[in-house]
Amino acid sequence: MRARRVLGALAVAAGGVLASSLAPALATDQSFQGYARDLRSGQLLYIESHFVKAVGTVDERRVVLYRCPQGEPFGRKELRYDREREAPDFSYLDARFGHLEGLRRVGTTLEVFDRERSGAATRTSRLAPGLGLVADAGFDEYVKAHWDELEAGETVRFPFLVPSRLDVLTFKVNKHGETEIEGAPASVIRLNLSGFFGWFLPYIEVSYRKSDRLLMRYKGLTNVWDARGDNLSAQIDFPAADRHEAEVDLEAARAEPLASGCPAGANPP
């Protein structure tokens, strides 16, 4: 069981979990940036551009563009929420490899799909109903729903979708401590695989601003691959100065061409 194929699926912040951690009274649009840096050197690895329509409503739609440090997009994720806040439909494509994965609703059932690389077959599987599934950016919704338990020091467990396995695994999450980000107190939430393998696989930490439960920082394995096809590890910060409430153009974000690679010398290679 390789870490990148398991915990990489839980790279929720890097995958687009962040919009508004408290649903607004009226539907709004939001855009913001995330900056992924190497954990040791601090070098910029890639940039995330998030575009969110009708935040916190059943009409919410999101597009996330993953960009080379110079700005060229190489990956795109699309999410659709409807009434399934903890398990939205999503599709993620990395054009450098042709890697594709996601979750979609087919009638009344859920279907997970995964394609390792261009030219490979797309594998699919129907999921059993009644799992209480958490998928991709739905983790953010799960944290909000269990905020009081986490703040009280409890450990909670949940079934999380791992597209590469076409199945779910049980993960656990608990509050690890507190920190300060941009001058504001934040709770540090740690998550990893529950059970035996959890002792050997790396953990992920996400930091939420205490005042409004807004995700400010992600640290650990991401869902973005390096040149070898292994998940990059990074710290991703979402500066307040780069958050904006204004109308977004999802069609333009969907239509932006994806590059098959970053320029020479750029990370991720």
Image (cartoon, helix red, strand yellow):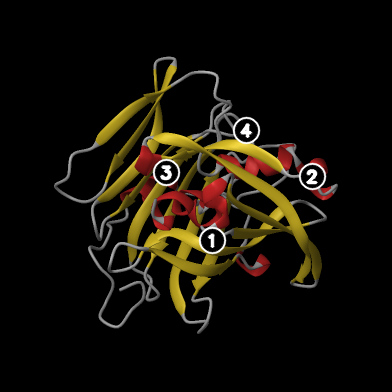
Of badges 4 and 3, the one in the foreground is 3
Q: Nearer the viewer, mark 2 or mark 4?
A: 2
Tag 1 residue = 202
The answer for how far apart the CA atoms under marks 2 and 1 are is 20 Å
| Residue at the far right in the pictured view | 152
What amino acid type is highlighted by mark number 2? Glu
State if disc 3 and disc 4 touch (CB < 8 Å).
no
Spot occupied by residue 135 in the image (x, y as percentages of width and height): 51, 38
The type of residue carrying mark 1 is: Pro
Residue 222, percent from left and from top? 47, 60
Query: Mark 3 sits on what residue?
Result: 78
What residue is pinned by disc 4?
Answer: 57
Say whether marks 2 and 4 touch (CB < 8 Å): no
- Mark number displayed over residue 154: 2
Real-space Cα separation, disc 3 to disc 1, in angstroms: 27 Å
Q: Earlier in the sequence, mark 2 or mark 4?
A: 4
Q: Earlier in the sequence, mark 4 or mark 3?
A: 4
